[in-house]
């Protein structure tokens, strides 16, 4: 009995010694689980690489397709809103252009009306200028020295200065070639001083208003 117990104890000690020296063996069940996990890891890696290599346009199309009815409705609403905004912007630009044209047109009309009014007033003043010139021309040298004549001459010069400031200037006539755009010929005269077609006399002075004829000169042309 004692020998049997000693033998069993020796065998047990030997088994424990072998277990300490050799690594723990994995069970078949553990090996199977590890293989499945490794296969899943490989599949996930391959799927990730395939996703990275996929076409971005196809991926965007897939996302768009995945939006569903609600997503498509939102896209249609956005497109409709963009079109509406474009129409309104075009309308605003057209209205601004029309208003700018209207402003320019009204400014031009106002300027034209003011010019016509000014022109009309000046035309009514020209006979007064003519009378001043006739009166001063009829004075003798002795009468021109009187204070009254001197005062009338100063008033006449002041009136002419005001007309010049308004853009009025006399048309040159005597000694100039006859020009129907500026001169109104009432007669032809014999002249030893001027050649044929040259203005020899001026009966009524003509005037320009901003380079346009305000009144033609009434003249006699040499023949």
Image (cartoon, rainbow, N blue to C red):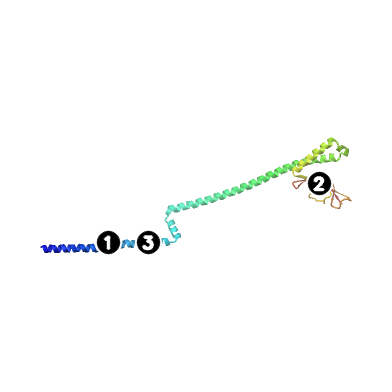
- Measure the C-alpha gap from mark 1 to mark 3: 23 Å
Residue drawn where x is 51% and y is 51% of the image = 82
Q: Secondary structure at mark 1?
A: helix
Horizontal and vertical percent for residue 11? 17, 64
Which residue bears the numbered disc 3? Answer: 45
Q: Position of residue 114 (x, y in %)?
A: 70, 42
188 up-or-down from 19: above or below: above
Q: Which mark is residue 217?
A: 2
Whether residue 140 is visible here, answered yes or no, is no
Q: Are marks 3 and 2 in contact (CB under 8 Å)?
A: no
CB atoms of marks 1 and 2 within 8 Å = no
Residue depth check, mark 3 versus mark 2: number of the one nearer the observer: 3
- Residue at 57 percent of width and 48 percent of height: 92
Q: Disc 1 versus disc 2: distance between alpha carbons? A: 127 Å
Which image quadrant for residue 8? bottom left
Q: Nearer the viewer, mark 1 or mark 2?
A: 1
Q: Is residue 130 above or below residue 194?
A: above
Task: Check if mark 1's residue and mark 3's residue have beta carbons within 8 Å.
Answer: no
Upstream in sequence: badge 1 or badge 2: 1
User: In the visual, does 124 lie left or right of 19?
Assistant: right
Give the labeled residue for mark 1. 30
Quarter of the figure that contains the N terminus: bottom left
Check residue 189 in the rendering and tell me which mark sits there, or answer none.
none
Q: Could you tell me which residue is drawn at 82 percent across and 37 percent down?
A: 152
């Amino acid at each position: 009995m004692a020998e049997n117990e000693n033998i069993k104890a020796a065998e047990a000690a030997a088994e424990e010694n072998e277990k300490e020296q050799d690594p723990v063996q994995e069970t078949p069940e553990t090996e199977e689980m590890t293989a499945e996990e490794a296969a899943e890891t490989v599949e996930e890696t391959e799927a990730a690489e395939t996703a990275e290599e996929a076409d971005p346009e196809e991926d965007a199309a897939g996302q768009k397709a995945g939006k569903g009815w609600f997503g498509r409705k939102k896209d249609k609403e956005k497109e409709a809103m963009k079109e509406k905004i474009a129409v309104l912007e075009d309308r605003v630009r057209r209205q601004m252009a029309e208003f700018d044209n209207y402003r320019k047109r009204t400014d031009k009309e106002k300027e034209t009306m003011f010019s016509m009014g000014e022109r009309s007033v000046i035309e009514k003043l020209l006979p007064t200028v003519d009378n001043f010139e006739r009166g001063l021309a009829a004075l003798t040298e002795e009468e021109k020295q009187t204070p009254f004549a001197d005062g009338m001459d100063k008033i006449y010069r002041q009136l002419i200065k005001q007309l010049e400031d308004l853009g009025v200037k006399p048309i040159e006539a005597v000694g100039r070639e006859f020009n129907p755009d500026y001169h109104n010929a009432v007669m032809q005269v014999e002249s030893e001083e001027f050649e044929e077609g040259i203005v020899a006399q001026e009966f009524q002075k003509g005037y320009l208003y901003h380079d346009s004829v305000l009144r033609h000169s009434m003249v006699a042309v040499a023949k």
